[in-house]
DNA sequence: GCCGCAAGGACTTGCGAAGATCCTGCTTGA
DNA sequence: TCAAGCAGGATCTTCGCAAGTCCTTGCGGC
């Protein structure tokens, strides 16, 4: 028997494979907001028929990454400055609440996970090139893992899943805005401070720092988006 | 021109019509958790082909109401006691945060909307029959509207949408558990107290009452579910 | 010159059939 | 008796085509 360790790791259907690829193309900004998603073109470039394509688009629409226009197909969801404001506020509120609960409920294992995630993150460079910004996928992954680790002990899986989704949406905004760098900002220090407050069980401080962390990024992205 | 007031109110596609019907059948418990959703049977009973059916199921899966089993179709998502715990905590945290923000940001119009929603709700009977419980759809609608009105001023549309989704999921649990009544409980008074605290701008009190409100329902549903 | 209307084209939508996959129950062999 | 292997059947998945819808373009009338 081939070692299928996870029961979920079945060989995926064409529809889900296409869904994943499309999702990544939208999140990375390769398919810009508002772009019409023509079934015929997509089917050709992804090497699939219309049926799996439609299925993938339906899922994307349900996730809010695509917009469905009855009898007129789909298009990539908008990423307007107006939406960014609500997104940031949603993140601050949802993650803030989850973080407070995590701090209240977290055990030793959670503390260790947070410590570890922070350590792994700050070990990596944000950019692959020290002079010009070049996205470091490894850092991106650890960044997501760190923010997720903070919430992991809140005991509310749906809320965590929601925060994951918001995090992805935020990544899309960053990609679309082509925000390359965060001048005059020590992101590593911000992460360290958040982790420290969480481990010190200072919920108010941790939540405040986290909200500021998101707000600061938002302001920069918003400036890029507006210009 | 026919008065299509809302640009969204186009005549829906078969796929979306089926999606809405399926969704309602799952939320109302007519399709119980875990039930296999056979494409052929569904297509027949909903009067559609396989393609629109698949599309609807994909969306339902993305919303978490159905579970996708690669190469084995779909089934209605589970509604286990374990999930209820996380659901209640998610609601308390997410709605609590949104409510606090609403209280901080809400203007006079928000106050009036809350007042009105509470008034409309407590005007209606929970049950159509005073002796036996018989769900009152009108009350259900006003109940949802009331809880939504509380959050409306938080300025975080994604968070509000998330709370809507959790509210639906909670309705499903209630339907599945066939919880008929809430003995020894004055739900109307609970709503009144929450509204009063919100209008008095007492965020701590309002959030606490709201959490208690959900927890209490959860305990009853859990008992029904376990027995 | 501008508005309304109709024909044409492009696209989406939905269906039926073919291909692929999985599950069930039986048979074989130890 | 039990485990492994092998059909057979059921189901899901995908493709190609026909039908329907919407948008655009060009024409005629005001």
Image (cartoon, coloured by chain):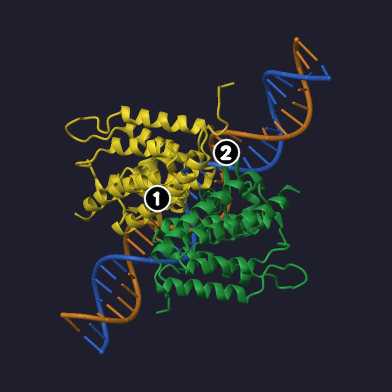
Chain colours: A yellow, B green, C orange, D blue
Nearer to me, B224 or A112: A112
* Quadrant where the image shows the N terminus of chain B: bottom left
* CB contact under 8 Å: marks 2 and 1: no
Residue at disc 2, secondary structure: loop
> Which residue is label 1 attached to?
A91
Give x and y (percent) for residue B9: 45, 69
Q: Which residue is at a point 48% across and 44% down the rendered structure image? A: A160
Residue A122 is at least partly visible in this image: yes
B184 up-or-down from A183: above or below = below
Q: Nearer the viewer, residue B170 or B31?
A: B170
**Circle 2 marks a residue in which chain?**
B
Q: Secondary structure at mark 1?
A: helix
In the rendering, at what x and y percent does residue C12 appear?
42, 57
Indicate whether A153 appears above or below B122: above
Above or below: residue A62 compared with residue A118: below
Q: Image point 49% across, 39% down: which residue?
A: A152
Residue A128, position in %: x, y?
24, 30
For label 2, the residue is: B71
**Quarter of the view holding residue A138:** top left
């Amino acid at each position: 028997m081939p070692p299928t360790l996870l029961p979920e790791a079945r060989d995926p259907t064409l529809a889900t494979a296409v869904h994943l690829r499309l999702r990544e193309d939208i999140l990375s900004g390769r398919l810009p907001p508002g772009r019409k998603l023509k079934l015929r073109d997509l089917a050709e470039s992804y090497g699939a028929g219309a049926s799996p394509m439609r299925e993938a688009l339906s899922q994307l629409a349900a996730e809010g990454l695509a917009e469905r226009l009855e009898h007129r197909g789909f298009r990539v969801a908008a990423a307007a400055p107006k939406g960014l404001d609500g997104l940031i506020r949603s993140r601050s509120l949802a993650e803030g609440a989850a973080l407070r609960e995590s701090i209240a409920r977290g055990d030793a294992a959670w503390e260790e996970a947070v410590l570890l995630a922070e350590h792994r993150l700050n070990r990596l460079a944000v950019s692959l090139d020290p002079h010009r910004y070049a996205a470091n996928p490894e850092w991106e992954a650890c960044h997501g893992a760190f923010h997720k680790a903070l919430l992991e002990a809140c005991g509310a899986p749906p809320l965590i899943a929601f925060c994951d989704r918001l995090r992805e949406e935020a990544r899309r905004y960053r990609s679309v805005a082509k925000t390359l760098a965060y001048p005059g900002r020590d992101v590593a220090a911000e992460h360290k401070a958040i982790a420290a407050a969480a481990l010190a069980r200072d919920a108010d401080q941790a939540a405040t720092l986290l909200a500021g962390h998101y707000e600061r990024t938002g302001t920069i992205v918003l400036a890029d988006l507006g210009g």
